Image (cartoon, coloured by chain):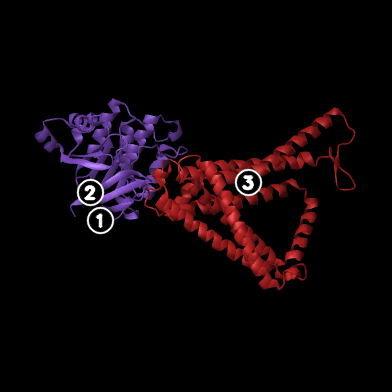
Chain colours: A red, B purple
Amino acid sequence: MLARLMKYEIKATARWLLPLYGTILIFALINRFTLFSPVMVFNSTYTEYSIPNQPVFSIVKGIASALFMLIYVLLFVGVFVATLIITIQRYYKNLLGDEGYLMFTLPVKSWQHILNKLLVSLLWYLLSSVTAICSILILIPNKDWSQLSYVFRQLKMIYGTSGIIMLILLVILNLVLNILMIYSAISLGHLFNKHKLLISFGMYLGIEAVNQFIILFVMLITTKIAFGSLNDISFNYAGRFGTLFGILSVLTVLLSAGYFVLTSYLVNRKLNLE
Amino acid sequence: MHNILECENLSKYFGPVKALDSVTLSIPKGRIVGLLGPNGSGKTTLIKICNNLLTPTSGKIRIGGFEPGIETKKIVSYLPEKNYLNNWMKVSEILNFFRDFYDDFNMDKAYDMLGKLKIDANTRLKTLSKGTKEKVQLILVMSREAQLYLLDEPIGGVDPAARDYILETIIKNYSENATIIISTHLISDIEKILDDIVFLKDGQVILTKTVDEVRDEYGKSIDALFREVFRC
């Protein structure tokens, strides 16, 4: 049943995001040719671009390339904003709006509905990230790729390979936590008769504050255990990122589980569709 | 088992408001039941509890022997008063959706009804009129071979000409053992198809009779009796 739910969820969301992905990739390609065209000349200092003294035609080209760049940047931000909006909108509208009458009378457990929304959201966040990275790779001329690998080497040196893997894991776990926080906040907001979205937003801030408090509290204790005295943190910590990330990961998983249970409970027992 | 739906002292409070107040009700298999009452009498609340969309405050409810949940959702076909269609889908896609989730969905029946009501399966739901959407929803609900149909205001938004076809559809498309519960205040329109009536007032059941009993005992139509009982 979960697979069938996911099939329809992906269909419902893909029609917004896939065209957006296509558009940003196209604009990355356009920018590759306009931004780094001979019209724009690299200064030897490698820090700024300048438009050399050329006929009006070239200036028009320069303006066009700036415009294309602006559109690309807006699209880049837009992809993530759109992903977030779709996460919120699909939960709010498809489950708690009128469409909820259809979804919640299907022979499916409510936690499967929530898991479905969560997994598909997560999928889109990953695809949005991959698309954004691809668009950067398209944009940057091949000769500049060595710069990128330099950045990666630096990262590897600071965090270590296991540290980087943990970091990526932690980012994903945090994404899961955040999506579940959004679901919890919207469900809590829905318990009220008026101003549901506004209250949901307030609930999210409240949940975030509670999280921060718990994380800070646990981190203070665990760093003390893991690193001895708090003052020692600045010394000799490179190899211990793994431990730190591990603790944070476990904490994130526990919090996520808590919000998943809360959301399921609210949806199952407390909610009254309008 | 004789009854498809059984409620025992079923209550639902919204804060201080008693939407359902100690409802005890048994509805046998194979009947068409009118759930009748003025606005705010608890009809929709009762139907929502049957569909597990609301949790009762107290009391018991059994549908086909089960508490509302996955097992009852498999045998209950529900038409809410809301438009619950996913606007981005085509009519054919929502039919596939129903086929994917309900084992008792009869695709041929659905296409047959679409044809009779002249609805093109390739149309996007978004572009349909409000009345046509209601018809599509009713087709979806009646194309299931369910044991209990719960129809909340099924004919409210469609024109009188389509009403007759829809009522005909309802009668034609349910099997002998299935029960249909129709909630409405358009009593005169559906009176002719009802077997039983349940009158709800302020969350309480004030009358349950068969239509024949009403005619024998009161010598009135259901519509006239309703007007008398619920006179303001």
Q: Nearer the viewer, mark 2 or mark 3?
A: 2
Q: Earlier in the sequence, mark 1 or mark 2?
A: 2
Q: Chain of mark 3?
A: A
Tell me the quarter of the picture where residue B206 sits. top left
Q: Amino acid at mark 3?
A: Phe
Question: Where residue A258 appears, x then y in whole percent?
Answer: 51, 60
- Describe the element under mark 2 as helix, strand or loop: strand
Q: Residue at x 78, y 70 (%)?
A: A235
- Of residues A16 and B63, the one nearer the viewer is B63
Left or right relative to B106: residue A203: right
- Residue B65: which disc? 1
Q: Amino acid at mark 1?
A: Gly
Q: Residue at x 73, y 70 (%)?
A: A239
- Of residues A121 and A153, the one nearer the viewer is A121
Question: Where residue A152 appears, x then y in whole percent?
Answer: 75, 59
Residue at which label 2 appears: B24
Q: CA distance from mark 2 to mark 3?
A: 53 Å
- Residue B82: which disc? none
Residue at which label 3 appears: A80
Q: Residue at x 24, y 34 (%)?
A: B168
